[in-house]
Amino acid sequence: MTTIPVSPAKIHISDKIASAVYEGLMSRPRWLPSWLFYDAAGSRLFDEITRISEYYVTRTERKILAEHCAEIVERAAGDNVLRIVELGAGSADKTRLLLTAAADRQNTVFYEPVDVSASALVEAQLRIEDELPGVIVCPRVQDYTQDLELDSTLPSERRLLLYIGSSIGNFEPGDSLMLLERVRAAVEPGDCFLLGVDLVKAEPVLQAAYDDAGGVTAAFNRNVLVRLNRELDADFDPATFAHRAEWNPAESRMEMHLVSAKKQEVWLPGIDLRVKFEVGESIHTENSYKYKPGAAEALLEKAGFAPEQTWTDEQGWFAVVLARAV
Ligand code: AVJ
């Protein structure tokens, strides 16, 4: 009689990761979902990316919000008390700008960050309640890409729901519409939605932003293989995969790929999978959609929101759109 050995990795891996990796690596072309980037190391690397000179996204949106946060809050609130909901556990200083503007108008602001990660929420809560005494944080552990359920509000209250940072850029067109429709179903008519989208711009600017000279984005991309080695017991050699960033004009998106520099075979015991790579064969790891002017407003309208105002930077690189649930 032989006993079948069970690898400890098999017991601890989450089904969500295992099934996504299995499906993606079995496909041709091979792909991995971009949410896999954000383990602890990946989140730190992304944080580093937001401070890189080539990565215009974060600082451009921050500048727009810094300039217009009072107006945004004013428009959203009208004569009502504002309650701020955010999809994601707070975009640090960008969220702080809006919370501060709201706290300037009313004694207390309720802030509900919605995130799958309980630890990210605890961190956000501690930071915000420490820095902004007028803000009461009510965290919600929820996967907003699956379902969204918010606390009910008083008649005198109005929600301002934030989805900033170009997070929507990672969703395929059909999925982004579904997400906005789900948001619409979770709020009341009159509630507001603030959406931050990255806009189409000159290719060299995009290229540099997703392939910085310091190699931080390359490390961020390769980190997904480090994660699979740890969590699925895989034997990827990240150094044998080149980072490639590419503008896809037909789909209006930046793509990231990991390109095998040699013919090789990778073994992922955690999902019982062997994957062969030819020289130059790649894994597609991310789509980052870039919107044409007016496209975000059209999408919001389709989802049941009336776009009220769009703010952009002087170069027209990024747009922040305020829309009202109808
Ligand atoms: C976090 C999805 C907004 O698409 O620009 C940064 C992720 N990828 N560099 C983006 C990312 C490569 C980022 N988002």
Image (cartoon, rainbow, N blue to C red):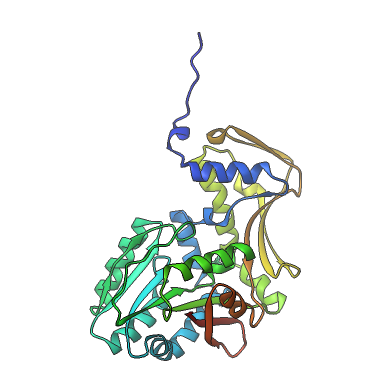
Q: Looking at the image, which residue is at 30% across and 72% down?
A: 128
Q: Looking at the image, which residue is at 62% across and 86% down?
A: 316
Residue 172 appears in view: no
Residue 311 appears in view: yes
Residue 61 vertical position relative to residue 27 in the rendered view, above or below = below
Q: Looking at the image, which residue is at 38% across and 82% down?
A: 98
Residue 269 at x, y = what percent?
A: 55, 33
| Pick the front one: 48 or 12 | 12
Q: Residue furthest top?
A: 1
Asked which quadrant contains residue 136, the reply is bottom left
| Residue 89 relative to residue 295: left or right | left
Residue 174 at x, y = what percent?
A: 62, 63
Asked which quadrant contains residue 87, the reply is bottom left
Q: Tell me the quadrant of ligand 1.
A: bottom right
| Residue 95 relative to residue 275: left or right | left
Residue 251 vertical position relative to residue 18 in the rendered view, above or below = below
Q: Report the number of discs.
A: 0
Residue 149 at x, y = what percent?
A: 39, 62
| Pick the front one: 63 or 238 | 63
| Residue 102 relative to residue 306: left or right | left
Residue 198 vertical position relative to residue 239 in the rendered view, above or below = below
| Residue 292 relative to residue 161: left or right | right
